[in-house]
Image: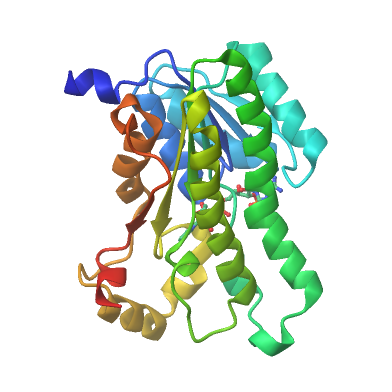
Amino acid sequence: MIKEMFNLEGKIAMIPGGGGGIGSQLAAGLCEAGAEIAIVDRSGSAMTKTCSLVQEQGKQALSITADLTQKEDADRAVAEVVDHFGRIDIILNAIGGGAGKVLFEAQEYPEQEWDWIMDLNLTTTLLATQAAVRQMVQQGDGGRVVNISSVRGLLGINAGYSAYVAAKGAINSLTRQWATEWAKYGINVNAISPTFVDTPQVAMLLDDAEFKAKLLARVPLGRVGQPEDLLGAVLLFASDACGFITGQILTIDGGLTATQ
Ligand SMILES: NC(=O)c1ccc[n+]([C@@H]2O[C@H](COP(=O)([O-])OP(=O)(O)OC[C@H]3O[C@@H](n4cnc5c(N)ncnc54)[C@H](OP(=O)(O)O)[C@@H]3O)[C@@H](O)[C@H]2O)c1
């Protein structure tokens, strides 16, 4: 029974941001659990690595190039997944970030950078999920939405993160709102909320020895996350095992928020 609960064979997983540092590893993990994988990313080259990871498991990922800040691209991406696989069972939203690139004091936070962070983190998740869920509703047999938030959706930080914390806070709220609205369709919506995960996006910060030492001092388990650390929770939220779990935001942070 336990194996069946976590078995994703026959499930189609669409992964926006599947070419990214986290998305690529999670795509490989969901594939290992049996799912067919469709990744959507801004550039074809970003998706090459993910395709090879999936290929190593004897499967072929579908890769779709799209800018998911654009509704027509999100709708087209979903249509391409359905053309290819016939349906969508899981959407794992793995686009986002940018926090460390645009740091401004809260009272000065510029509109252009605000819009960029919102588009990158929130609009992509909104448009891709709307399109995928319309398809799930039409299929009529439920589905799973998994969002990637951040501990910054929950905690303030004494640095110029206003737009990022607002975007991730909104992802947390939408996770609860969508869970509430879409329960009647059997669509469960949950989010993971990591602290620093060792990916190219944060490599520059983690290469700074002083920054890293301060960070690790605050994490009870004494290390940053690896993309694989997110896989157990994502598998839970993508699978039948989360049948009665919806609207939850699971922090994955080596105990960081437990200390706050
Ligand atoms: N890494 C961390 O420490 C960390 C911690 C907490 C939460 N998170 C969250 O985890 C998620 C994934 O992070 P990550 O580190 O894997 O980031 P990443 O490596 O930058 O991956 C994101 C992927 O999404 C793509 N993308 C960006 N905008 C897009 C768009 N409009 N349409 C289609 N694709 C687009 C990116 O392409 P480009 O490279 O071309 O932009 C990239 O391939 C984000 O939501 C992030 O906030 C990350």
Q: Quadrant of the C terminus?
A: bottom left
Is residue 256 left or right of 247 when viewed as pictured? left
Q: Quadrant of residue 196?
A: bottom left
- Residue at the far left: name it: 1
- Total label count? 0
Q: Residue at x 39, y 59 (%)?
A: 194
Q: Position of residue 127 (x, y in %)?
A: 70, 41
Q: Position of residue 189 (x, y in %)?
A: 47, 39
Seen in the picture, residue 243 relative to 100 is either above or below; the reply is above
Residue 97 at least partly seen: no
- Residue nearest the observer in this picture, 104 or 166: 166
Seen in the picture, residue 175 relative to 235 is either above or below; the reply is below
Is residue 163 left or right of 55 when viewed as pictured? right
Q: Position of residue 54 (x, y in %)?
A: 45, 26
- Residue nearest the observer in this picture, 250 or 178: 178
Q: Position of residue 130 (x, y in %)?
A: 66, 36
Q: Residue at x 51, y 35 (%)?
A: 50
Residue 116 at least partly seen: yes
